[in-house]
């Protein structure tokens, strides 16, 4: 099977080619023992920047939030500094670290319903707080899990990155949302063989034009811009969807490295909030880097069936 597909939301082009499925060797993972100099572990709180907030108690935290010691952006006057032919802007923004658990070796693949609910509430709180900052137009929450995802520390954590500009892919997705393409896509995926799981509020499916093998998207049925407009009951449904997705991954892919992003509405724009998860199985090469066209070696239909069957 070789097909070229377009993502109707982001407008990205991908190649689905299962003939290349077995050409890559397994990636190397790494393990670090608990307490082996990990700055995210309990007892090492003084080795991180000042704490912004936490869940749990004063003496026993469950989630900790603080600024990244090596930030992508820092707060400064959001001004254009480009001259002549080239555009440039001050790197204004915020980069926060969200430590998801005090347990060094606890994987998000094993998080339960209560934990995911707690995490999503923090994601929402920090996102809304950052949107209040002057000059911030987009806030991204992300998880890099495992060395192949780009994570430099094994301890489960997420990051929040506030941008002064709206990333180009988000602009394209926002434009698609104006046409209600996300809502039309959800209607189609409910009847497709890419459906993995659904509950009363959310759908979990393999994206028709997924860039990565076993890529998963999670969408609310309602056209909502962000977590902020969801009730606790709806956030509980999202926590269930995430837990089920991770359960399926663990069953099929074992302890897989992955990237996860929460796509929320840019400031003042229409959008359909959703989550995207990208397992890191394939290596990129010159085709991907030179054309921005990904080659997906496991079709969304195949990956959805494997993940769906794992939940039975």
Image (cartoon, rainbow, N blue to C red):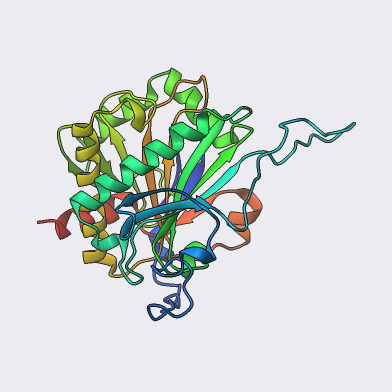
Q: Is residue 309 above or below residue 4?
A: below
Q: To which quarter of the image does residue 227 belong?
A: top left
Q: Is residue 297 above or below residue 23?
A: above
Question: Residue at horizontal 38%, vertical 37%?
Answer: 124
Single out the residue that lies furthest toward the front.
58
Q: Residue 82, how many percent across, how many down?
A: 83, 34
Question: Residue at horizontal 32%, vertical 40%?
Answer: 121
Q: Residue 164, how many percent across, how many down?
A: 63, 33
Q: Residue 70, how many percent across, how many down?
A: 62, 58
Q: Is residue 120 left or right of residue 69?
A: left
Q: Quadrant of the N terminus?
A: bottom left
**Camera-side residue: 212 or 148?**
148
Q: Is residue 243 above or below residue 207?
A: below
Single out the residue that lies furthest toward the right.
84
Q: Is residue 243 left or right of residue 103?
A: left
Q: Is residue 1 visible?
A: no
Q: Is residue 73 left or right of residue 81?
A: left
Q: To which quarter of the image does residue 145 belong?
A: bottom left
Q: To which quarter of the image does residue 178 belong?
A: top left
Question: Residue at horizontal 22%, vertical 56%?
Answer: 307
**Camera-side residue: 193 or 111?**
111
Q: Residue 282, how many percent across, how many down?
A: 46, 65
Q: Quadrant of the C terminus?
A: bottom left
**Camera-side residue: 171 or 147?**
147
């Amino acid at each position: 099977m070789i097909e070229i597909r377009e993502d109707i939301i982001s407008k990205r082009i991908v190649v689905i080619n299962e003939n290349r499925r077995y050409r890559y060797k397994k990636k190397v993972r790494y393990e670090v023992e608990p307490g082996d100099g990990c700055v995210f572990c309990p007892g090492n709180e003084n080795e991180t920047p000042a704490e912004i907030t936490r869940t749990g108690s004063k003496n026993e935290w469950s989630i900790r939030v603080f600024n990244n010691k090596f930030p992508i952006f820092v707060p400064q006057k959001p001004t254009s500094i480009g001259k002549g032919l080239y555009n440039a802007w001050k790197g204004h923004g915020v980069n926060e670290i969200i430590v998801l658990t005090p347990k060094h070796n606890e994987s998000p693949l094993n998080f339960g319903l209560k934990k995911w609910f707690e995490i999503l509430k923090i994601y929402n709180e920090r996102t809304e707080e950052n949107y209040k900052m002057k000059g911030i137009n987009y806030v991204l929450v992300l998880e890099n899990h495992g060395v192949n995802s780009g994570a430099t520390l094994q301890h489960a954590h997420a990051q929040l990155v506030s941008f002064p500009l709206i990333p180009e892919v988000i602009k394209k997705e926002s434009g698609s949302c104006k046409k209600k393409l996300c809502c039309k896509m959800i209607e189609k995926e409910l009847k497709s063989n890419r459906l993995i799981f659904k509950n009363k509020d959310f759908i979990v499916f393999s994206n028709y034009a997924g860039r990565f093998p076993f890529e998963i998207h999670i969408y609310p049925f309602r056209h909502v811009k962000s977590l902020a407009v969801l009730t606790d009951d709806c956030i509980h449904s999202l926590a269930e969807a995430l837990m089920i997705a991770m359960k399926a991954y663990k069953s099929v892919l074992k302890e897989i490295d992955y990237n996860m992003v929460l796509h929320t509405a840019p400031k003042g724009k229409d959008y359909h909030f959703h989550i995207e998860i990208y397992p890191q199985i394939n290596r990129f090469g010159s085709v991907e880097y030179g054309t921005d066209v990904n080659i997906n070696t496991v079709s969304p239909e195949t990956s959805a069936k494997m993940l769906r069957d794992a939940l039975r």
